[in-house]
Image (cartoon, rainbow, N blue to C red):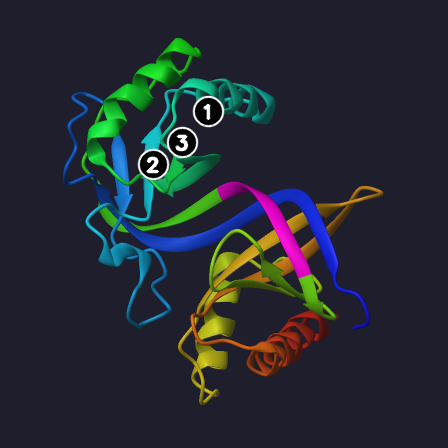
């Protein structure tokens, strides 16, 4: 490509991860969840969860709050809470229901959590009471994307290391996506990557569906091959519809 495109937009990532109650929970009577393995499809060194604090923490709220409400509260909180935590709106499928949540990333110290929760309460948030959880769950998170198109239909995340997005023609049901990913990884020599579904909002009310890839060792050649494999599998799904 002669000139790479940098895009700022929003969208969603859908993934499946093992979730459990926060082990170092110092927040009494509040439902707080952590990821046990943040990128379960990738097995390597220097993973985010190698640190003492989990890569992702979820504060379960009593009700679903609008995107604007969460965005304005996050902006207000960032002005006086100076620890640089990444805040996002999310939803977790658990207990045969959908649990609205606030997803926290880059929380480097558990001791900051009570102050942060207090900030959210000051902004009008109400949190659910604690329940026991230890299960694989589907997670949907609203993401602010800052990405660069490094090849046709292949994007690099400029804020999240080792994270890439591959354009695909449609969104699949999660079990379909999971089955396809399993098949692709069993037919690739370089199969040490984690995959999730997602989409970007684009201009003119368009949506661009993508596969999110987390791979510390990836390059354009490897990503192009993975993209080709996914496109072939998606074509089979489309043909089976007719």
Residues 212 and 91: in front is: 212
Residue 101: numbered disc: 3
Residue that numbered label 1 is attached to: 78
Magenta stretch, residue numbers: 141-148
Q: Quadrant of residue 208?
A: bottom right
* 235 versus 147 height, above or below: below
Residues 228 and 241: in front is: 228
Of pointers 2 and 1, the one earlier in the residue sequence: 2
Residue lying at 63% horizontally and 57% vertically, measured from the top left:
171
Residue that numbered label 2 is attached to: 58
* 92 versus 120 height, above or below: below
**Mark 3, secondary structure of its residue:** strand
Q: CA–CA distance between discs 2 and 1?
A: 18 Å
Q: Is residue 142 left or right of residue 53?
A: right
Q: CA–CA distance between discs 3 and 1?
A: 18 Å
Residue 19 image position (x, y, % from top left): 27, 47
Is mark 2 in CB contact (under 8 Å) with mark 1?
A: no
Residue 22 image position (x, y, % from top left): 20, 39
Q: Residues within 10 Å of mark 2 (few under 14, many from 20)?
A: many
Residue 182 in view, yes or no: yes
């Amino acid at each position: 490509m002669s000139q790479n495109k940098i895009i700022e937009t929003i969208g969603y990532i859908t993934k499946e991860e093992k979730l459990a109650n926060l082990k170092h929970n110092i927040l009494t009577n509040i439902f707080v969840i952590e990821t046990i393995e943040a990128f379960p499809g990738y097995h390597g060194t220097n993973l985010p969860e190698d640190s003492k604090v989990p890569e992702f923490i979820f504060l379960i709220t009593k009700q679903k709050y609008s995107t604007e409400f969460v965005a304005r509260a996050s902006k207000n909180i960032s002005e006086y809470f100076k620890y640089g935590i990444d805040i996002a709106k999310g939803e977790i499928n658990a207990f045969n229901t959908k649990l609205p949540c606030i997803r926290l990333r880059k929380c480097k110290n558990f001791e900051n959590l009570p102050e942060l929760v207090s900030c959210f309460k000051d902004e009008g948030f109400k949190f659910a009471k604690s329940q026991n959880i230890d299960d694989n769950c589907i997670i949907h998170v609203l993401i602010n994307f800052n990405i660069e198109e490094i090849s046709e239909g292949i994007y690099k995340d400029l804020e999240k290391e080792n994270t890439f997005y591959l354009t695909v023609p449609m969104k699949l049901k999660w079990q379909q996506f999971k089955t396809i990913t399993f098949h692709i990884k069993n037919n690739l020599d370089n199969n040490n990557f984690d995959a999730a579904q997602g989409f970007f909002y684009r201009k003119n009310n368009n949506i661009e569906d993508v596969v999110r890839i987390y791979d510390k060792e990836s390059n354009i050649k490897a990503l192009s091959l993975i993209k080709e494999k996914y496109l072939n599998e998606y074509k089979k799904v489309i043909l089976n519809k007719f």
